[in-house]
Image (cartoon, rainbow, N blue to C red):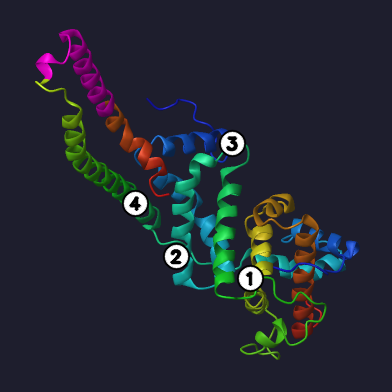
Amino acid sequence: MPDPNPPACGSLDADRALVAAVLARRPGAFERLVRDYQRLCWHIVDRMVRHPEDTRELCQEVFLRIHRQLHQYRGESPLKSWIAQVAFSVARRHLERRRLPLAGDDGEADGPGVAARTASGFDLEASVAEEQINACLHAAIDALPPLQRTLLALYHLEEMPIGEIAHLTGLAEGTIKSHLFRSRRRLRELLESRFGGVP
Amino acid sequence: MSTNGIPPVDEAEWAAQERARRSADGGGADPRAAAYRHVVRALRSMPCGEPPADFAARVAAQVEVHAHGLERLLLRVLLVVFVLALPVGLVLGASMWPPGGPAQAGDTGAWMLVLLAAVSMSWITARLLEAGPGRLGRTGTG
């Protein structure tokens, strides 16, 4: 008989209940877990690898690994955080295996990096409509190194606090703050160099 | 991954970035944060791929295949071990059998105990096998 007062979705109680259901092999429980967290996993992996086919395979790998290791989940931190950690780790290992740079150059100079890679396709004479600004910035974000791109997505899209991002990436909070700061500043500088004093 | 040597953050500018993050859609007369509002809005509207509609069902099905595959493998291994152990046990048992056969080996009570132990072992094994698939399934893909 279903619980008349099920724990709120996303709470630790709900996480523990879902994990217990999966471990008890209750029909549909694991599928529900995947459905609940597939977007988070997809966003992290996609931001890291930027390759649709690889993203699909790696996300499958993430959930297979989660299924294998679910008995290790203690229920002391949100399941979301644990799944994000596995997703990040799988994507990072994929990049390392392919010898692709993870953090890239986080230097001061914008130089030929983001600006050069996003230079084509934008009419500087055209009006600075919001869509154009967004398109320019989206291209610039895409051109960022995987780590910076993913940190921005976790912070702005998933709205994770820096402490949680530090936990799942294994990076120091100061390092994450620095990456966020410098990435956003580079994007602002790019915007100003393209469109001048945007309103 | 190398994250060493990252210069310190300019706290005033970081504060402006955070103000923009908190009020990306609002106005405000803060010129420093205004420049970052476009950045924050772009970050929030970043296009990202979505999993296919049947992704969860496919992964769940894959997990089932893995789990059942391992169960089948373990059952086959157990069967092979049993088939190999049976003749070995018969040969060893026969060599330990006293001359004249079991009728002269001892009292009936001892043989009844042996029989009882064998039945108990069979019953316990059957219960373990019944409980086995669930337990195997949880760790089955590992």
Does the residue at mark 3 contact the one at mark 2 (Cβ under 8 Å)?
Answer: no
Question: Mark 4 touching mark 3, by CB under 8 A?
Answer: no
Amino acid on which disc 2 is placed: Arg
Determine which residue is flagged by label 2. Answer: A56
Residue kind at label 1, given as amino acid type: Pro
Q: What x and y, as percent, mark residue A67?
A: 45, 47
Instruction: Tell me whether marks 4 and 3 sit on the same chain.
Output: no
Which of the 4 image quadrants contains residue B1?
Answer: bottom right
Q: Chain of mark 3?
A: A
Q: CA distance from mark 1 to mark 3?
A: 30 Å
- Type of residue at label 3? Leu
User: Could you tell me if the residues under marks 4 and 2 are in contact, i.e. CB atoms within 8 Å?
Assistant: no
Q: Which circle marks residue A146 in the picture?
A: 1
**Crowdedness of circle 3 by 10 Å Cα count: few (<14), some, many (20+)?**
some
Above or below B91: residue B80: below
Query: Callout 2: 10 Å neighbours few (<14), some, many (20+)?
Result: some
State the residue at coordinates (21%, 11%).
B110
Q: For the residues marked 3 and 2, what is the alpha-carbon distance in whole angstroms? A: 28 Å
Q: Is residue B94 magenta?
A: no
The CA distance from mark 2 to mark 1 is: 17 Å
Residue pointed to by mark 4? B66
Residue annotated with mark 3: A12
Give, as a three-letter code, the residue at label 4.
Answer: His
Secondary structure mostly seen in magenta is helix
Q: Secondary structure at mark 4?
A: helix
